[in-house]
Image (tube, rainbow, N blue to C red):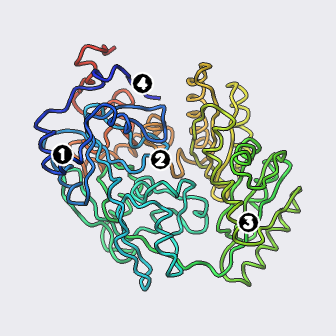
């Protein structure tokens, strides 16, 4: 993990130039600027709290024009800036720059349009994921991607990280549901990427932008496609004597030609935490549980559901609970979606990792993670999207007992293990600050250079969310180009080694 410095409030970072403050006040209004030390501290990190840095200023624009004006000021003055939504990201993607600006999108919260005929919605980036479905529900429509944090995470952040969720196995990730983006580029220019349909002539700049983790610009209007609510939904919760049997069920379901809407797995630690938190009816003693959901036409859904039940029973299912109605189904999902936060009930601290492996290697990777946790003297809870091999291991530790360094090292080793087994460093949480140093384990020097060229085409000055996603030419985490001393170094608080 990057080494960050924490000093007294008066020594956090050099104050931004008064001219920059005045220009930003002119762009967005003085009332929409946060500059007091207490207020700034609210923006020092995202959901990955091990990385913290207090920004120089925070601006809160009210519309696309305000975002563009703020970006233009930063560009003109050479000030780095970071866009921030709800701050629920888990990779340090919204970590501020010490002497930079945070452009907060929390006031851009309007659903601009819901078109039930063409099944589209136009949204500002601060609209929460779940509120899209709420806005579409009166028309019998919904928005398919559903991260576990969907009640609080925003569509702008979903675009930045290309988020998925439990139902991404059948319905795909954010990129499969975004048609058009109104984007503020790093120099303040406003452009449109994509169009009325998913396929457009020329380079797919919409696809390049989605998942770029805020390094290419700021999405300020997002047009998404909506789906009709399925005719039938069937959900079951199945217990198994081991994660190996549960993993074999997942492989057999897919091998049978069945594509469930979702297949989620939880191990015993995750089950204990979730059940303590919400009482969803999970079996506390079971080593592993699967949540399987099918949807679609009633006849097809019914037939495939019977096949899934038979596969579960063939692999030693010890308990099979079928949701009888929407309320029971919601209860099962409440347990699964509460798992991340619920882990706080069984551990004072934890790190959420995110990696992907082939489905056929689920049992192997879980065994390896268990061995690695034992060697590190730490527990690891597992809850993940089993259908597409997207793991979310939670490394449990106690910082007050001096376990932080071991937890961070174990978390990094788990991410790199996924690459070793033929997978990737991230499925949906992103690389951000957390895993930038691990990128060379997955990509060659030429791959990384190509990514950097794309990034530089959008942002030649390197001001938009610097230090994220890509390892830098020198020490990992050091900004590319001419050496720029840290503000605390300039103030004489620290020395460069």
Hey, which residue is sitting farthest front in the picture?
31
Q: Earlier in the sequence, mark 2 or mark 3?
A: 2
Residue at point 42%, 60% (across, down)? 155
Q: Earlier in the sequence, mark 3 or mark 1?
A: 1
- Counting other residues with Cα less than 10 Å from the Cα at mark 2, is it few (<14), some (14-19), or many (20 or more)? many
In the rendered view, tell whether residue 53 sits above or below residue 301. above
| Mark 3–mark 1 distance (CA, rounded to whole Å) | 50 Å
The location of residue 163, given as percent across then percent down, is: 49, 56
Classify residue 401 as left or right of residue 470.
right
Q: Earlier in the sequence, mark 4 or mark 3?
A: 4
The location of residue 165, given as percent across then percent down, is: 57, 58
The location of residue 464, given as percent across then percent down, is: 28, 45
Q: Which mark is residue 30?
A: 1
Do tag 3 and tag 1 residues touch (Cβ < 8 Å)?
A: no
Callout in the foreground (2, 1): 1
- The front one of 64 and 451 is 64
In the rendered view, tell whether residue 121 sits above or below residue 479. below
Q: Tag 4, which secondary structure?
A: loop
Classify residue 242 as left or right of residue 207.
right
In the rendered view, tell whether residue 184 sits above or below residue 380. below
Hey, which residue is sitting farthest left in the picture?
19
Callout in the foreground (1, 4): 1
State the residue position of label 2.
88
State the residue position of label 4.
3
Q: Tag 1, which secondary structure?
A: helix
Q: Which mark is residue 328?
A: 3
| Mark 2–mark 4 distance (CA, rounded to whole Å) | 22 Å
The location of residue 319, given as percent across then percent down, is: 87, 58
| Mark 4–mark 3 distance (CA, rounded to whole Å) | 46 Å
Q: Which mark is residue 173?
A: none
């Amino acid at each position: 993990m990057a080494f960050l410095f924490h000093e007294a409030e008066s020594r956090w970072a050099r104050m931004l130039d008064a001219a920059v403050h005045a220009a930003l006040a002119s762009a967005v209004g003085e009332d929409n600027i946060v500059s007091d030390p207490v207020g700034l501290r609210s923006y020092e990190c995202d959901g990955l709290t091990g990385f913290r840095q207090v920004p120089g200023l925070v601006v809160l624009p009210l519309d696309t024009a305000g975002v563009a004006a703020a970006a233009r000021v930063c560009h003109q003055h050479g000030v780095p800036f970071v866009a921030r939504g709800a701050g629920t990201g888990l990779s340090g993607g919204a970590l501020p720059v010490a002497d930079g600006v945070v452009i907060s999108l929390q006031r851009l919260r309007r659903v601009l349009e819901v078109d039930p005929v063409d099944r589209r919605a136009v949204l500002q980036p601060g609209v929460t994921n779940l509120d899209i479905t709420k806005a579409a529900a009166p028309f019998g429509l919904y928005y398919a991607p559903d991260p576990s944090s969907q009640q609080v995470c925003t569509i702008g952040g979903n675009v930045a990280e290309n988020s998925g969720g439990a139902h991404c196995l059948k319905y795909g990730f954010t990129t499969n549901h975004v048609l058009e983006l109104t984007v503020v580029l790093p120099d303040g220019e406003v452009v449109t990427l994509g169009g009325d349909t998913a396929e457009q002539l020329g380079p797919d700049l919409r696809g390049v932008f989605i998942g770029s983790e805020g390094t290419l610009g700021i999405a300020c209007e997002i047009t998404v496609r909506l789906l009709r609510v399925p005719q039938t939904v069937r959900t079951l919760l199945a217990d198994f004597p081991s994660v190996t049997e549960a993993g074999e069920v997942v492989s057999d379901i897919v091998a049978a030609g069945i594509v469930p809407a979702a297949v989620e797995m939880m191990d015993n630690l995750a089950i204990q935490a979730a059940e303590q938190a919400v009482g969803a009816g999970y079996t506390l003693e079971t080593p592993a549980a699967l949540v399987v959901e099918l949807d679609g036409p009633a006849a097809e859904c019914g037939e495939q559901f019977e096949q899934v039940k038979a596969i579960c029973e063939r692999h030693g299912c010890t308990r099979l609970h079928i949701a009888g109605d929407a309320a029971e189904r919601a209860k099962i999902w409440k347990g699964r979606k509460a798992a991340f936060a619920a882990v706080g009930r069984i551990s004072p601290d934890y790190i959420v990792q995110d990696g992907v492996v082939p489905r056929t290697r689920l049992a192997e990777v879980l065994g390896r993670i268990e061995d690695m946790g034992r060697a590190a003297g730490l527990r690891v809870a597992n809850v993940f999207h089993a259908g597409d091999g997207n793991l979310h291991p939670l490394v449990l530790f106690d910082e007050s007992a001096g376990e932080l360094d071991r937890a961070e090292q174990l978390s990094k080793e788990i991410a790199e293990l996924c690459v070793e087994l033929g997978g990737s460093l991230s499925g949906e949480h992103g690389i951000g600050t957390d895993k930038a140093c691990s990128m060379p384990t997955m990509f060659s020097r030429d791959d990384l250079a190509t990514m950097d060229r794309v990034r530089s085409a959008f942002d030649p000055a390197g001001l938009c969310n610097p230090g994220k996603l890509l390892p830098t030419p020198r020490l990992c985490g050091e900004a590319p180009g001419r050496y720029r001393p840290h503000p605390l170094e300039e103030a004489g608080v620290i020395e460069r080694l």
